[in-house]
Image: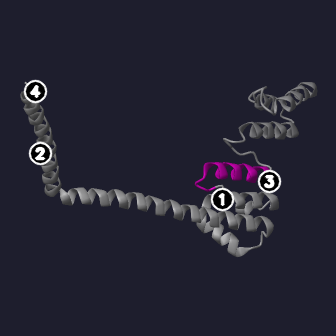
Amino acid sequence: MSIKDDVNYVKKELSGDEKVLESAFKLETLYKKHKLKIWGLMIAVFVYFAGTAVMNAMHEAKLVKANEAFLTLQTNAEDANALKVLKEENPALFELYSYATAVKKEDIKTLETLSKSKNAVISDASGYTVGVLKKKPVDSKLYKELVLFEEAYLAIGAGDMQSARNKLELIDERSPLGVITSFLKHFTIKVN
């Protein structure tokens, strides 16, 4: 019986080895049949990841150049080369720098140009600053309460207390302007 068991064991082992060998032949046949597709896919994956790495490296280099130009402008605002590099490499940072510079110099012309920017924050802030410099209230999403406060202040200056009160009522009491708004409300009541 021991020989019979040994024969069965050998048959099972040979059958297992045959299955492994058969799988290897199937895999080899599959590879030969689809060799171009497999290599094409591998090359495409490699090119994708290499391209992504190159694009990220180029983007990072642009940011480094723009940051160096910005730091140069912080120390020497008259550096035309740094201004040009900043404008080419990072237009959003260039607009922010231009806005800050125009506000410092009260340059209405530059601020009016920036108020047409595609960047909503720069556009809104520039438009509001132009309005403040020209002493004309303008609509602003960022400075809505300040616009209302300014309109109320101008109405008080014009002697229109009712209009001033209406504008002040639109400002939330929890706003940073809440305390000053309540003082102005009391002022409009006492004046009448």
Residue located 82% across and 29% down the image: 178
- Name the side, left or right, on which 37 lies relative to 137: left
* In the image, residue 117 lies in the stretch drawn in magenta: yes
Residue 42: image quadrant is bottom left
Instruction: Indicate the amino acid at tag 1.
Output: Leu
- Which quadrant of the figure contains the C terminus? top right
Residue that protrudes farthest toward the front in the picture:
2
- Callout 2: SS: helix
Residue 35: image quadrant is bottom left
Residue 138: image quadrant is top right
In this rendering, which labeled residue sits more in front, label 1 or label 2?
2
Cα distance, mark 1 to mark 2? 64 Å
Instruction: Indicate the amino acid at tag 2.
Output: Glu
Residue 46 is tagged as none
- Which quadrant of the figure contains the N terminus? top left
The part of the chain drawn in magenta is 116-132
Residue located 86% across and 29% down the image: 179
Cα distance, mark 4 to mark 2? 30 Å
Cα distance, mark 1 to mark 4? 86 Å
Residue receiving disc 1: 93
Counting other residues with Cα less than 10 Å from the Cα at mark 2, is it few (<14), some (14-19), or many (20 or more)?
few
Q: Earlier in the sequence, mark 1 or mark 3?
A: 1
In this rendering, which labeled residue sits more in front, label 1 or label 3?
1
- Callout 1: SS: helix
Residue receiving disc 4: 2
Cα distance, mark 2 to mark 3? 85 Å
Residue receiving disc 3: 133
Q: What is the chief secondary structure element of the magenta stretch?
A: helix
